[in-house]
């Protein structure tokens, strides 16, 4: 299978602390890797290294078989887009939605000025929002709608890799489910490759093809989703699964997986 992302021996130090310790990881094209682990395990650090927000002390990152430079070019930045837990991190509160979507399209020369309006409406429709949202501002939307706008902005530059760092953790359960369904729909329609980070194993089960587990800066397990949930290899993975509260069957109809039922 053709690889979208290759991570080779990536190491990150913070002072005397090793945040990432020789990470080795391959992500095939058009698949979703779910990355799990406790807080402080290195999940978000790895995401930021891949996105070019943190420069590793050692190692290589290859996207579509091309090594990414430490100082990313505009084209390299365009090819990897990141969606954060809090959509306000990527949505300028002083800009209308039209401005937010347009600036990325213009900066990366995705479409000409005469096509901006049409493209912005297409992006909103892609995330199930109406075109009239273009004249509004981020504070006029709910948390789930703002996250959809953040997704639209990330998709606007047609990335090769989409990184989602806990994008549903701040949302109500019903809204989480609709956003996860949107991610899965977009993946199918656009042939996306995604790295999806979450501490919620129900979310990971709903979104992932493969599951990778991090602990204290180390990648301790990576396996296909069904294998991971049925037969986790490491004691740490089994601890993560056993820590998920067992929900009554009548409360599991919302689409999330309960690994203990």
Image (cartoon, grey):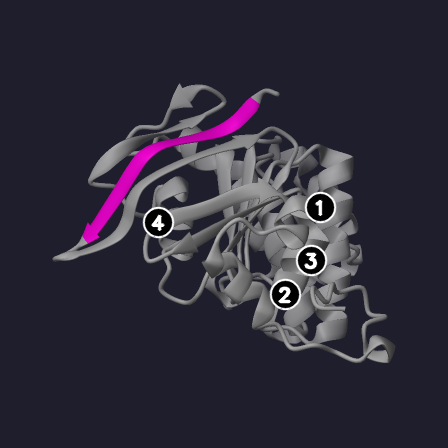
Dot placed on the residue nearer the N-terminal end, 4 or 1: 1
Q: Residues within 10 Å of mark 4 (few under 14, many from 20)?
A: some
Q: Which residues are magenta?
A: 3-13
Label 4 belongs to which residue? Answer: 218
Q: For the point 33% across and 47% down, which residue is it?
A: 53
Q: For the point 35% across and 53% down, which residue is it?
A: 45
Q: For the point 61% across and 28% down, which residue is it?
A: 29
User: Vertically, is 37 above or below 74?
Assistant: below
Q: Position of residue 188 (x, y in %)?
A: 77, 38
Question: In the image as oriented, which residue stretches furthest toward the left?
Answer: 16
Q: Label 4 near label 3: C-beta < 8 Å?
A: no
Q: Is residue 5 magenta?
A: yes
Mark 3 vs mark 4, foreground winner is: 4
* Secondary structure predominantly adopted by residues drawn in magenta: strand
Q: Is residue 233 magenta?
A: no
Label 3 belongs to which residue? Answer: 134
Q: Secondary structure at mark 2?
A: helix
| Cα–Cα gap, marks 2 and 1 | 13 Å
Can the viewer see residue 199? Answer: no
Dot placed on the residue nearer the N-terminal end, 4 or 2: 2
| Cα–Cα gap, marks 4 and 2 | 33 Å
Label 1 belongs to which residue? Answer: 123
| Cα–Cα gap, marks 2 and 3 | 12 Å
Residue 13 falls left or right of residue 117? left
Label 2 belongs to which residue? Answer: 146
């Amino acid at each position: 299978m053709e690889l979208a992302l290759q991570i080779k021996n990536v190491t990150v130090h913070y002072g005397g602390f090793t945040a990432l310790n020789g990470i080795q990881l391959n992500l095939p094209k058009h698949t979703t890797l779910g990355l799990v682990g406790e807080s402080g395990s290195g999940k978000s650090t790895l995401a930021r290294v891949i996105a070019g927000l943190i420069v590793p002390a050692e190692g290589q990152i290859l996207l579509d078989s091309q090594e990414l430079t430490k100082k990313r070019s505009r084209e390299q930045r365009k090819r990897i887009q990141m969606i954060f837990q809090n959509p306000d991190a990527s949505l300028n509160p002083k800009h209308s939605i039209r401005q937010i979507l347009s600036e990325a399209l213009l900066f990366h020369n995705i479409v000409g000025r005469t096509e901006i309006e049409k493209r912005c409406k297409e992006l909103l429709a892609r995330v199930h929002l109406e075109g009239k949202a273009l004249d509004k501002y981020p504070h006029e939307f709910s948390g789930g709608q703002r996250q959809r706008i953040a997704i639209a902005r990330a998709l606007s530059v047609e990335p090769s890799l989409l990184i989602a760092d806990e994008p549903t953790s701040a949302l109500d359960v019903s809204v989480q489910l609709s956003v996860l369904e949107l991610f899965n729909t977009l993946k199918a329609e656009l042939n996306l490759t995604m790295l999806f980070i979450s501490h919620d194993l129900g979310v990971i089960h709903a979104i992932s093809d493969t599951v990778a587990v991090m602990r204290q800066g180390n990648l301790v397990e990576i396996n296909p989703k069904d294998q991971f949930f049925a037969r986790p290899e490491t004691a740490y993975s089994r601890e993560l699964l056993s820590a998920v509260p067992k929900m009554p069957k009548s409360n599991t109809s919302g689409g999330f997986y309960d690994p203990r039922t």
